[in-house]
Amino acid sequence: MSRKVIQAYLDEIEQLLLNCSNTYIEEYSAVILMPDRANLRIKIRFALKYLLAVSEAFVIVDNQITYIDYRYHF
């Protein structure tokens, strides 16, 4: 079940990124490390040349995403 929760979360993030206008996704890396743990790394370039880098590490606890680490740089 945990893997389905992770996949649903990653699918949702991907759809949100695809629907962003005036952006370019420079990097999208999702790695499922274990059935209940994953990492996500995204770099989004905005039309005004700004860059947002997001890095997440999370686990599934009681069918809910629990963040181990979350970093961003703008």
Image (tube, helix red, strand yellow):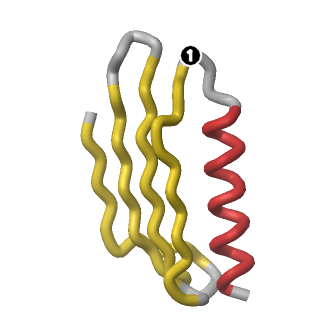
Name the residue carrying label 1: 22
Q: Amino acid at mark 1?
A: Asn
- At 40% from the left and 62% from the top, the residue drawn is 56
Seen in the image, is 14 located left or right of residue 26? right
**Residue at the extreme front:** 26
**Placement of the N terminus among the 4 image quadrants:** bottom right
Can residue 10 be seen in this snapshot?
yes
Helix, strand or loop for disc 1: loop
How far across and how far down the image is residue 48, in percent? 39, 10
Can residue 61 be seen in this snapshot?
no
How far across and how far down the image is residue 31, in percent? 52, 70
Seen in the image, is 17 located left or right of residue 4? left
- At 62% from the left and 27% from the top, the residue drawn is 20
Residue 1, relative to residue 10: is it above or below?
A: below
Q: Nearer the viewer, residue 64 or 37?
A: 37
**Placement of the C terminus among the 4 image quadrants:** top left
Residue 60, relative to residue 56: is it above or below?
A: below
Seen in the image, is 32 located left or right of residue 7? left
- At 55% from the left and 77% from the top, the residue drawn is 32
Quadrant assignment, res 41? bottom left
Q: Nearer the viewer, residue 69 or 47?
A: 47
Residue 22, relative to residue 58: is it above or below?
A: above
How far across and how far down the image is residue 67, in percent? 41, 70
How far across and how far down the image is residue 35, in percent? 60, 89
Seen in the image, is 1 located left or right of residue 61? right
Q: Residues within 10 Å of mark 1 (few under 14, many from 20)?
A: few
- At 53% from the left and 27% from the top, the residue drawn is 24
**Residue at the extreme top:** 48
